[in-house]
Amino acid sequence: MNHDRYLQNQKRRPVKKNRRGCSPRPWTFVVLILALGIGIYTIVSGMNQPEFAPGPILSSYEGISDTPEEDYDTSETETEEVYNEAPLPLPMVSISTRDISNTGYLILVNHQYPATGNPDSSLLTAAWPTVAVSRVDDMYLHHSALRAVSEMFASARTQDVTGLFVSSAFRDFYRQAYIFGDGSNSAYVMPPGHSEHQTGLAADILIADIGMAEMAHSPQGRWMADNSYRYGLILRYPQGMEHVTGINFEPWHFRYVGQIHAYYIMKRGFVLEEYIRYIHNQGHFSFEKNDETHHIIFQLPQNGMIYVPYGRDFTISADNKGGYIIWTTE
């Protein structure tokens, strides 16, 4: 082989590169650029996200039936809550949860959700002499509940329904612990901290000369079960719903929730657990009563803020499950 051909062959031979000293391959830069882009997009999209999306628009007002929807789960197990994030058909404005006037009318208190404490003493009013009671001392009710019970008793008397009296009203944690005792009567008595009586919104109403066991079949007991909703009261533990409420049938236990909520609960055949769950699942619904349109709205706080109707009166209650339920009318 001559010298020139030898040099040509040397040029064709591949040169082995030192991996330790080689520069990064092009795809490495691609991966880094993509990762950086995703991070920037995540930050920007989070900054531009609205604080909260209110509940769904309804194209028509809801027709009220006498029974719950067929596909509504009334089992004791909590169903997954599906919140529709479509905008509301009402003008809304955001406010801080610190600035709301919380009525507490729809606070859920049961085995799973304990009472959040005693109501403010300014909200409690002595039941006697406004209504008949089993004892005149240490018998208090939330002023709204007392007004409702008083109106129901007065209306009952005009229809010859007599003998009604309040046997138990507000009970604090320690009083409930005494009544609960060793828990042997837990089918009827909630453990301390889990009784509606601690809210001041619940009253046990008995009938003179009629035992508790006979109450449901008495004319007075049937009248209260059929008419209590007119005054904002619901029969809290109805027969056949023990698997939802966790408490046996108590024809004497009535709970104040407000007239509009009591009306809807009665028409749909709900207990309070079902009603609150229904509101969560719907997000928003409307119905007509007495030539007025009533809107029920569920709100979950975001960054301590919720949306409330703008330029109209409304009432709002915490539900004891982290959300707020608003009622307004037009």
Image (cartoon, rainbow, N blue to C red):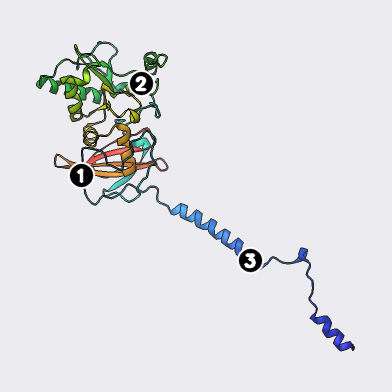
Q: Which residue is mark 1?
A: 63
Q: Amino acid at mark 3?
A: Trp
Mark with earlier residue (3, 2): 3
Please give the residue where the numbered disc 2 appears in the rendered image. 187
According to the image, label 3 marks what residue? 27
**Tag shown at residue 156:** none
Residue 208, by quadrant, is top left
Q: Nearer the viewer, residue 74 or 92?
A: 74
**Quick one: quadrant of the N terminus?**
bottom right
x and y, in percent, of residue 313 in the image: 23, 39
Q: Could you say where residue 104 lies in the image, as x and y percent from the top left?
A: 31, 30
Three-letter code, disc 2: Ala
Count up the numbered dots: 3
Residues at marks 3 and 2 touching, judged by CB atoms closer than 8 Å: no
Q: 10 Å neighbourhood of mark 3: few (<14), some, or many (≥20)?
A: few
Q: Residues within 10 Å of mark 1 (few under 14, many from 20)?
A: few
> Which corner quadrant of the image does residue 150 belong to?
top left
In primary-sequence order, the first of circles 2 and 1 is 1
Residue 65 seen in the current view:
yes
Q: Is residue 317 visible?
A: no
Picture layout, residue 259 above or below residue 37: above
Query: Which residue is more in the foreground, 56 or 250?
Result: 250
